Image (spheres, rainbow, N blue to C red):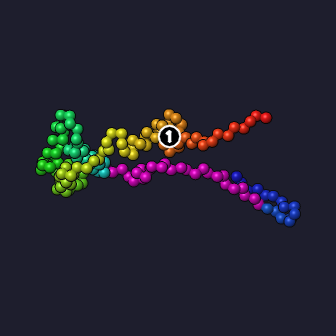
């Protein structure tokens, strides 16, 4: 908008009034767009892929599933992680990791297995989902919002 001229009758001055610029709406940024700010680099995605291969081998080697096909996966993964195969060395180098260090850590995790998964129907995720299902079904939480206690004495008001 262009400025306009106005006359002030009280003071007798001529005023040049410039209207304010229109307010531009602020541009919102996406919440999780930090990864988009960096340029794409193919090598990082390839390293992530090979690290996922090593991670899957460790998960398979630490598996406690008694089914025969899982037992064969466990045996193959254990041999691959603890042996000195060229494939293992190649995968570690492509992942950007030292093969000897990965082998040492894998042997350590196989010797001292820890629970990486909670028993069925236990753990904080199960409890969280159970509370969510209860809220959805009944409209409230049963444990954290108990029903009001029954009164100790009953007061009856007569109708008059």
* Residue 103 location (% of width, % of height): 17, 53
For residue 66, which quarter of the picture? top left
37 left or right, relative to 97: right
Region rendered in magenta: 16-42
Label 1 environment density (alpha carbons within 10 Å; few <14, some 14–19, many ≥20) = few
Query: Which residue occupies the foreground of this view, 146 or 1?
Result: 146
From this viewpoint, which residue is outermost toward the front? 153
Q: Residue at x 46, y 36 (%)?
A: 133
Which residue in the structure is indicated by mark 1? Answer: 142
Query: Which residue occupies the foreground of this view, 137 or 6?
Result: 137
Q: Residue at x 50, y 45 (%)?
A: 144
Residue 50 can be seen in this image = no
* Residue 109 location (% of width, % of height): 21, 51
123 left or right, relative to 6: left
Please determine whether, in this image, residue 54 is positioned above or below residue 156.
below
**Is residue 138 within the magenta segment?**
no
Q: Residue at x 12, y 50 (%)?
A: 84
Count the marks: how many? 1
Query: Which residue occupies the foreground of this view, 9 or 139?
Result: 139
**Is residue 20 within the magenta segment?**
yes
* Residue 139 location (% of width, % of height): 54, 37
Helix, strand or loop at label 1? It is: loop
């Amino acid at each position: 908008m262009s400025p306009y001229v106005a006359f002030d009758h009280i003071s007798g001055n001529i005023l040049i009034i410039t209207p304010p610029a229109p307010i531009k709406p602020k541009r919102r940024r996406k919440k999780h767009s930090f990864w988009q700010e960096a340029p794409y680099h193919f090598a990082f995605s390839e390293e992530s892929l090979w690290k996922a291969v090593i991670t899957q081998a460790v998960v398979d080697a630490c598996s406690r599933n008694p089914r025969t096909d899982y037992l064969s996966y466990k045996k193959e993964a254990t041999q691959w992680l603890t042996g000195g195969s060229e494939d293992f060395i190649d995968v570690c180098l492509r992942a950007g990791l030292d093969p000897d260090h990965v082998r040492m850590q894998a042997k350590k995790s196989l010797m001292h297995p820890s629970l990486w998964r909670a028993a069925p129907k236990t753990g904080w995720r199960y409890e969280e989902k159970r509370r969510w299902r209860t809220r959805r079904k009944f409209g409230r939480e049963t444990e954290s919002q108990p029903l009001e206690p029954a009164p100790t004495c009953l007061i009856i008001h007569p109708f008059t």
